[in-house]
Image (cartoon, rainbow, N blue to C red):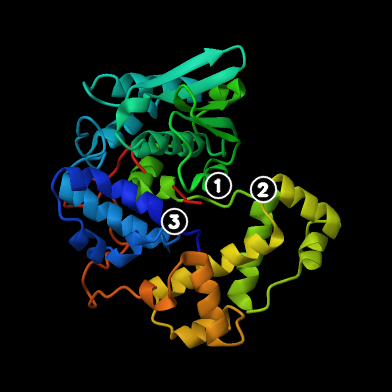
Amino acid sequence: MARRTITVQHVRAVLRGAERGGVDTVPLLQAAQIPPLLLGDDRARITAAQFARLFRELYRATDDEFLGLGSSPSRPGTFAMMCYAVLGCRDLGAAMERGVTFYGLFPGGPDLVLKHTDDGVVFTVRNDLDQDFFLAECLVIIWHRLCSWLIGRRITLRWADFGHPPPPHKDEYELLFGCPVRFGAARTGAGLDPHWLRAPLVRDEDALAAMLRRAPFDLLSRREYGTTVAEQVRRALAVALRDSPRLPSLGEIAARLAMSPATLRRRLARESTSYQRLKDAVRRDAAIAGLAEGREPIAQLAARLGFSEDTAFHRAFRRWTGTTPGAYRAEVPDGRGAHSLEGRGAGSPPRSAATGTPGQQS
């Protein structure tokens, strides 16, 4: 099943630290099998595997867990040691307090705050952490998903605020954070109900070591938690597309969810989406994954995704991404830059890539 794809806006943002450090990023993109020309189109997207490979290349190039995005570098291994430091805490609240204290020991490091208010608990990141706000956003994502991993349950955020104007891809933030979002706020952070802080930690050192071998990619990759109707519909469509080019109708999906078609339409509208948009997104993500990660001929891919002819697929793909299917065929010779995501974790040699930086994406 194809995973959600990632907007090119995030690719540009994650490269900026290396660019400011004078690093030539074109070889890094090529090693990650991302055609550099894609960065010129605002509608372009890449796969999670491509993004993970780019992270690996940036770690090697910057020797910095913050990828050159912060005011000061974070030495490789810092995030891992923070995780080991919090693992022995009695509950999530104590773990979060210890993690905030840990990062506060580093001059120029992230200024993290955990604040208890009458309205709940607020976790914030200093807004001027980096010039492009990307690192601050990523820290919120990482901490949310790390906390969820520590207690073995997905923590539902009440809201997420961002201390900068809305970016061009603002519509993806609610999907990325799974909660209402607001831009132009006084600070970047997220709110959660206080009862989560009483949850006990359920992970041990063996589980942590396994997670760190894949960090930060596992924490950054958005899971399908099924917490919204849109997520349930999207997952059903993605599973169906894996087996057949014919996608179920809105009525068929509504029946599976035990509701009427009209109710399903209303629920999706309240979540700022529609059945057609979800179908397009599932086909788009499957198309990008097929083009970027596989060798399937374009005509065969088009047929597998339910298009009766190549021209219809080309039109749809250009509408989704602003370019042609051929642009997503990475021009990288076999064996260059294709690092295995399973066989070589982020904590493996040549250095640890476990980090507090990163999203799914949407």
Amino acid under disc 3: Ile
Q: Secondary structure at mark 2?
A: loop
Q: Which mark is residue 171?
A: 1
**327 displayed left or right of 78:** right
**As drawn, which residue projects farthest toward the top?**
118
Q: CA distance from mark 3 to mark 1?
A: 13 Å
Residue 319 appears in view: yes
Residue drawn at (51%, 44%), measured in percent from left and top? 170
How dense is the environment of label 3, judged by Cα within 10 Å: few (below 14), some, or many (20 and up)? many
Toward the viewer: 232 or 22?
22
Earlier residue among tags 3 and 2: 3
Element marked by disc 1: helix
Answer with mark 2 or mark 1, whichever residue precedes in sequence: 1
Residue drawn where x is 45% and y is 42% of the image: 167
Assign the N terminus to one quadrant of the image: bottom right
| Cα separation between marks 2 and 1 | 9 Å
Q: Residue drawn 68% across and 64% down?
A: 276
Q: What x and y, as percent, mark residue 296?
A: 43, 83
Residue at mark 3: 6
Dots 2, 1 in contact, CB < 8 A: yes
Q: Residues within 10 Å of mark 2 (few under 14, many from 20)?
A: few
Task: Classify residue 87 by image quadrant.
Answer: top left
Question: Which three-letter amino acid code belongs to the residue tagged 2?
Answer: Ser
Task: Give the quarter of the image for residue 6.
Answer: bottom left
Q: Secondary structure at mark 3?
A: strand
Q: Is residue 151 left or right of residue 241?
A: left
Give coordinates of residue 60: x percent, y percent: 18, 51
